[in-house]
Image (spheres, grey):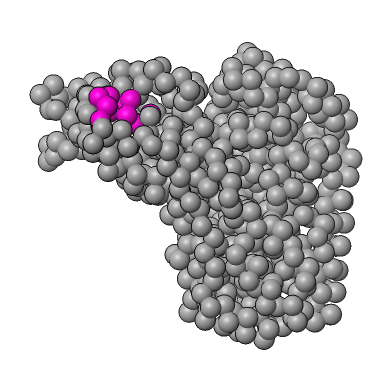
Amino acid sequence: MKTKRLTTAQAIVQFLMHQHVERDGKRRPFFAGCFGIFGHGNVAGIGQALLQYPEFRYHQCRNEQAMVHTATAFAKMSNRLRTLVCTTSIGPGATNMVTGAATATINRLPVLLLPGDIFARRNVAPVLQQLEQPYSQDLSVNDCFKPVSKYWDRINRPDQIIAALPEAMRVLTSQAETGAVTLALPQDVQAEVYDYPVALWADRVWYIPRPAPEATLLGRALEWMRASRKPLIIAGGGVLYSEATAALARLAAQTGIPVVETQAGKGALRYDHPQALGAMGVTGTRGANLMARDADLVIGIGTRYSDFTTASKTAFQNPKVRFLNLNIAEFDAHKHAALPMVADARAGLDALADALRDYQVAPEYRARVSELNGEWDAEVGRIYAAKDKPPVSQGAVIGAVNEFSRPEDVVLCAAGSLPGDLHKLWRTRDPKGYHLEYGYSCMGYEIAGGLGVKMADPDREVYVMVGDGSYLMMAQELVTSIQEGYKLTVIMLDNHGFSSIGGLSQSVGCGGFGARYRYRNAASGHLDGEVLPVDFAANARSLGAQVFAVLDLPGLKSALVKARRQTKTTVIVIETDLEKRVPGYESWWDVPIAEVSEVEAVRQASKAYRRAKAHERYFL
């Protein structure tokens, strides 16, 4: 067998350069490069290899968690068919990636993590940043990645990568089992040399299949659908990843079955499709939640049924409701004691549509969908048209950005009250025009994620909407976007605190405790003094961004025009009112409330909580 003498790190980079994926006859490289911050644990290993092979592009970042968010967003925008690699030194650089790994795995998105690790040879231990435990020497901080990785391995000998790398690729390219993959690389092993088989670096293509539904289950699904009088489709992220939006639109139009969307699935239908009822669940529309309440058949397509989608198992109240799940992941297909069709979303939708040419919902059911659709469009229009005096409402800001943006532009968000309002209010016109990280709802994802989206599709304008809370957690990737020449437009909403948790705190009787950015009050002892004077515009400007600070909606609209003309990342700062909220619509979320309290508001909230909790259901 022909061999070549390389270091472990050089061999890894060479392998990654030759991995491709193919779906529907289209082939593309799987890895688009590597983000990293170098330290003693990877500078002489992976760092040296990236220097040696510049065709595998290296990107510098400012925070290790952020670079994993960028890779996650890149993979999401690429429908899981491409991703980025992230490398760090051992120690705090590695553990900084744990949150990013959890974000990727929870959202079922592929990222490859290559943290440095402690020495495989132990004669120099304990080394700098080594975690010592008296009961084991085969342990490092990288063991923290195990519960948040879909595949984890520690490479203690150079030859182990011959077996480990293909296994890592198997998981990364699996549409059912993908997520964060972690290969912990001891710093001495990275630099060790080995005679590797040249075949390890041959171009390899990983085929992404489209498995069709099993015939018997498909037949039973068709029986259930024909027998249903109030069917409802819940479209999840799997619809987008499978590129099944056209197939869903065809089935919905053909049958008249209404469609509601999860956060990950928003964009599965255009907002103005006749069967589109918009967002489902806790952050859902009135029409979506009313139809879910009475549905006798819930058809989940590519959804994992999070508690926000099911309103903590209170959304579906029809005593005879049944679930039919079409999902590439067997784990999700079986949820809610469903009829499980384990299949690709597009293949499954096409099979259903072909077999249901003779089926339509009743005319009165279709008319009810149309009525609710119209009512919701009017409600969104009302919120968009608000003539707020400063500080303006968050809903009006969303409306201004939505109406200014083009169909192909992308809005991105992750945490706070913005995701709920965007889920309800954003009028999606393109399958990839709405990008929310809401599996983990990780504060700080926004700007780093916006960079990943822009890297995946540079021709689109990317509008990052972020609250002051998330901005303060991780704004530094503005520098990376400017360094790399990837322009973002960031709309930073300053409401002087945590709007989402503040509203939740009020609803549970805690009055917004700890959710506002204020000085400590000497009289009360709490953080309820004067508002903190944080200058977000100055901060963004100091990082190299073009900045527009505006006071009102006309100023925002003018700034959006100016931002589109810019060639570098632009930040628009606008103050919003913490109390001008978009309401909830026919939904509830289980947040347990203190069963005893000296505070009257908490006691009243606890009573309401017990009444609402009684509507939670098991589906057996």
Image coordinates of residue 449 in percent, x first then y, are 58, 35
- Span shown in magenta: 3-13
Q: Is residue 586 visible?
A: no
Residue 14 horizontal/vertical position (percent): 38, 29
Q: Quadrant of residue 331?
A: bottom left
Q: Picture coordinates of residue 332 (x, y %)?
A: 49, 64
- Please check the rendered image and state whether residue 6 is part of the magenta-colored stretch, yes or no: yes
**Residue in the image at 68% along x and 27% along y:** 488
* Residue name at image x 54 percent, y 68 percent: 212
Q: Quadrant of residue 218?
A: bottom right
Is residue 417 found left or right of 271 in the rendered image?
A: left
Residue 127 among magenta residues: no
Out of 322 and 168, give the one closest to the viewer: 168
Seen as rendered, the residue at the extreme front is 1
> Does 437 appear above or below 487?
below
Residue 171 drawn at (x, y percent): 40, 49
Considering depth in this image, is 361 or 396 the residue closer to the camera? 361
